[in-house]
Image (spheres, rainbow, N blue to C red):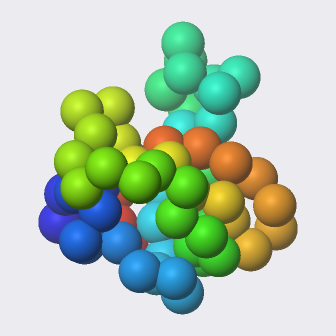
Amino acid sequence: MDGNKRENIKAGSKVAIVLKQDQRSGKLTEGVVKDILTKSPVHRHGIKVRLSDGQVGRVKKLL
């Protein structure tokens, strides 16, 4: 599945995101989507989401 398309991501989905501070290293953080923050249907760097624990980042993988 593609983390660049908003239609693939739903609240409650388990995803791996890259946090802003981890963009250089590419370190992924896993969690469950609480809110989808990107309004456009596609974003080339990944759809921005807020996880249930409050962390914000761009989706790189759907788990």
Quadrant housing residue 27: top right
**Residue 57: x, y in percent?**
59, 44
Q: From the viewer's perspective, is residue 44 above or below residue 21?
A: below
**Residue 19: x, y in percent?**
64, 36
- Residue found farthest to the right: 53
Q: Residue 27: tell me if it is visible.
A: yes
- Residue found farthest to the front: 39
**Residue 13: x, y in percent?**
46, 81
- What residue is at 48 percent from the left and 56 percent from the top? 16
- What residue is at 68 percent from the left and 48 percent from the top? 56
- What residue is at 61 percent from the left and 70 percent from the top? 35
**Residue 8: x, y in percent?**
25, 72
Question: In the image, 7: left or right of 31?
Answer: left
- Residue found farthest to the left: 1
Quadrant housing residue 9: bottom left
Q: Residue 4: tell me if it is visible.
A: no
- What residue is at 54 percent from the left and 12 percent from the top? 24
Question: In the image, 24: left or right of 62?
Answer: right
Quadrant housing residue 61: bottom left
Q: From the viewer's perspective, is residue 51 above or below residue 57?
A: below
Q: Quadrant of the N terminus?
A: bottom left
- Residue found farthest to the bottom: 12
